[in-house]
Image (cartoon, rainbow, N blue to C red):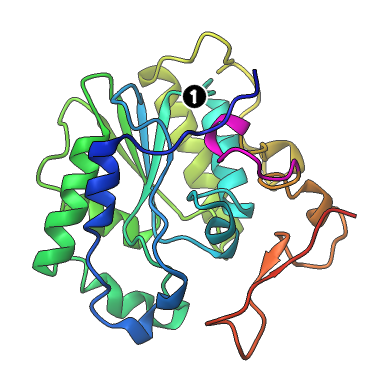
């Protein structure tokens, strides 16, 4: 039987439905709505990945970290031998305009945002959790504000997968893989003994998003943008926001 994500259980659906509106709607792609998670919400995750906010591919999929950045994250998880025992969440459920990111970092501590986000974080993990990976400054601030973070879980801070500093990105992720391979147990069908990151980010460092992380019925190319990257045009994903109507229009190109 084909694997797919059947969506959140009732308790999580109710929690997600209580997501507060952003503190400044103009700082977000608000009209596209929130995107909440990817991976296991049943407490079985050994790694919690926290990133910043969803992008256009995430809006299409209804799952977070599935575009170019998410496929880099999947490669990172693969180097730890994880094929399923993870959950991915964000500091913001709404997509943030990059120019407003620093300002919105300061709003992560607003009471409504803080209480809801911390409840999501705490409800998503269980005693199996071995590590929290905070990717980028927004995620690191969100995790810092999480007063219920399980102390048995190692906290690793790394650059965001879309970082424009490739040296810092690779150095940080390489060190994190070395650290976490000692801490995190691989899944039965995973392998944590393969190559770590080299001096450049290679296509082999990406992995497609597993079908089990995506809703039923999405096309086969969603979650695997290797064909887009191979074109060498500088566009990393099959989904983009066209200017000037990026607040209301997405362009999604089917695989050639």
* Residue 105 vertical placement versus 119 (above, below): below
In this rendered view, identify the residue nearer to me: 104 or 180. Answer: 104
Can you give x and y, in whole percent of width and height, for residue 3 in the image? 60, 25
Q: Which residue corresponds to the image point at 52% horizontal and 46% vertical from the top-left? A: 171
Report the quarter where the C terminus lies: bottom right
Report the quarter where the N terminus lies: top right
95 within the magenta span: no
The quarter of the displayed image where residue 155 is located: top left
- Residues drawn in magenta: 211-220
Residue at the bottom extreme of this rendering? 244
Describe the element under mark 1 as helix, strand or loop. loop
* Residue 8 vertical placement versus 226 (above, below): above
Q: Which residue corresponds to the image point at 40% horizontal and 30% vertical from the top-left? A: 40
Can you give x and y, in whole percent of width and height, for residue 69 in the image? 58, 53
Q: Is residue 162 left or right of residue 24?
A: right
In this rendered view, identify the residue nearer to me: 135 or 52. Answer: 52
Residue at the right extreme of this rendering? 256
213 within the magenta span: yes
Can you give x and y, in whole percent of width and height, for residue 9 in the image? 32, 34
Secondary structure mostly taken by the magenta-highlighted segment of the chain: loop
Q: Is residue 205 left or right of residue 154?
A: right
* Residue 30 vertical placement versus 7 (above, below): below
The quarter of the displayed image where residue 190 is located: top right
* Residue bearing the label numbered 1: 84
């Amino acid at each position: 039987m084909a694997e797919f994500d059947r969506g959140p259980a009732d308790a999580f659906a109710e929690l997600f439905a209580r997501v507060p509106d952003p503190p400044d709607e103009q700082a977000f792609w608000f009209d596209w709505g929130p995107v909440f998670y990817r991976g296991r919400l049943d407490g079985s995750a050994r790694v919690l990945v926290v990133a910043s906010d969803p992008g256009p591919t995430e809006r299409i999929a209804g799952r977070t970290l599935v575009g170019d950045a998410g496929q880099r994250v999947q490669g990172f998880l693969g180097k730890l031998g994880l094929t399923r025992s993870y959950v991915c969440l964000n500091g913001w459920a709404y997509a943030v305009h990059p120019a407003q990111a620093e300002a919105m970092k300061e709003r992560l501590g607003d009471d409504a945002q803080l209480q809801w986000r911390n409840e999501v974080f705490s409800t998503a993990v269980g005693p199996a959790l071995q590590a929290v990976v905070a990717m980028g400054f927004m995620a690191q601030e969100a995790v810092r504000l999480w007063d219920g973070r399980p102390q048995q879980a190692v906290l690793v801070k790394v650059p965001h997968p879309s970082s424009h500093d490739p040296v810092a990105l690779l150095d940080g992720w390489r060190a994190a893989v070395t650290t976490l391979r000692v801490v995190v147990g691989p899944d039965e069908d995973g392998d944590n003994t393969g190559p770590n990151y080299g001096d450049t980010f290679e296509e082999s460092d990406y992995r497609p998003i597993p079908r089990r992380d995506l809703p039923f019925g999405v096309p086969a190319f969603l979650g695997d943008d290797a064909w887009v990257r191979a074109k060498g045009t500088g566009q990393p994903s099959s989904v983009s926001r066209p200017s000037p109507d990026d607040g209301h229009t997405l362009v999604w190109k089917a695989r050639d």
